[in-house]
Image: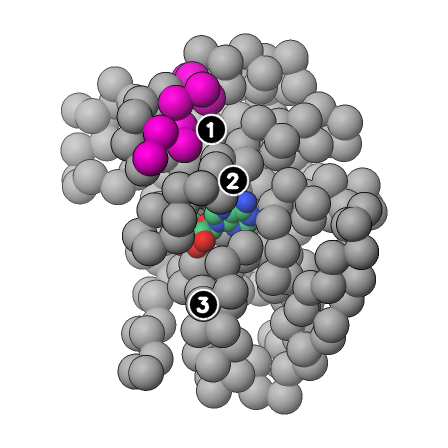
Amino acid sequence: MKPKAYHASGEHKIGKTLNKLGVDIAHPKFPRVFLETGTNDGAGVDWALSLPDVFHSIFSCEIWEPNFIDLRVRYGATRLEGYAEIPLIAGNDDQLVSVIRKMTTGGTFLEIALLDSRIWLPMLLKARVDASLIWLDAHPGSGVPSELGLPLKDELKALREFSRPDDVVLIDDISNFGTDIDGGCYKDTTREYVFEQLKEIYPDHEIISTIGMEAFFSEAHGYDDYFAVIPPHLMGDTQ
Ligand SMILES: C[S@@+](CC[C@H](N)C(=O)[O-])C[C@H]1O[C@@H](n2cnc3c(N)ncnc32)[C@H](O)[C@@H]1O
């Protein structure tokens, strides 16, 4: 299979969204750890890898083995030459998973796990020592079966238990919440529910829905569909 093309670093919607919201990623209190649920083809990981002065560690998980195999091939042939792949026992049910692990030449630690975020996220959040940029982007669609369901409710439970005051959280695709699309996997996770959860978990943070900012986010579709949860000291002037 032909490897997928690399992603240009400035082009990812995480960076664009933070930029549009005026969040300064060079701020001394901006998180130095990147956590992502749903790796897919590695676009989010590539964005974080392109910022070695910001992130010292990058962690991502992918449930769908065909996507993970694709990542293994692509990363093995490119940035992860010499990477280690380690079988691990993880979770409460002795689930065997595989982890791609690498210290890059730029000094960034990267780990991608073949694992359901419902198991992975609480383990990671519990073990971490630093605040994180948490990119919650795991969901079915594009060939990933809807039967896997939307893990967001469980991810929010993990955040409730292990959040940190300096975390920045971005949640993708909120316009799908509460709808019937993709086999109904979003149906019982409404935007109102997610917003209320975030308010309770991060009471001092700004919680911004970028829906309705279409005029503001006028460049293109693709980054007007988020909850952004930002600590007050990182809130800038929107551009
Ligand atoms: C939209 S893609 C992620 C895109 C990527 N985060 C980025 O920024 O480019 C969603 C991915 O989530 C994965 N996924 C779905 N449910 C998951 C779960 N419970 N745990 C981990 N990954 C999951 C899917 O297989 C798919 O690869």
For label 1, being within 8 Å of ligand 1 is answered no
Q: Which residue is mark 3?
A: 66
The residue lying toward the viewer, choosing from 195 and 52, is 195
Q: Quadrant of residue 110?
A: bottom right
Which residue sits at x=58%, y=19%? 198
Q: Nearer the viewer, residue 65 or 44?
A: 65
- Numbered disc total: 3
- The quarter of the picture where the C terminus appears is top left
Q: In the rendered image of this protein, does residue 200 appear above or below residue 138?
A: above
Residue 237 or residue 60, whichever sits in front: 60
Q: Which mark is residue 138?
A: none
In this orientation, does residue 146 appear? Answer: yes
Type of amino acid under label 3:
Pro
Q: Amino acid at mark 2?
A: Leu
Nearer the camera: disc 1 or disc 2: 2
> Distance from label 3 to label 2 (Cα)?
20 Å
The image shows residue 200 at horizontal and vertical percentages of 64, 12
- The residue that label 2 is drawn on is 136
Q: Which residues are magenta?
A: 183-191
Residue for badge 1? 228
Query: Which mark is first along the chain, 1 or 3?
Result: 3
Tag 3–tag 1 contact (CB < 8 Å): no
The answer for how far apart the CA atoms under marks 1 and 2 are is: 11 Å
Q: Tell me the quadrant of the picture where the N terminus can be found.
A: bottom left
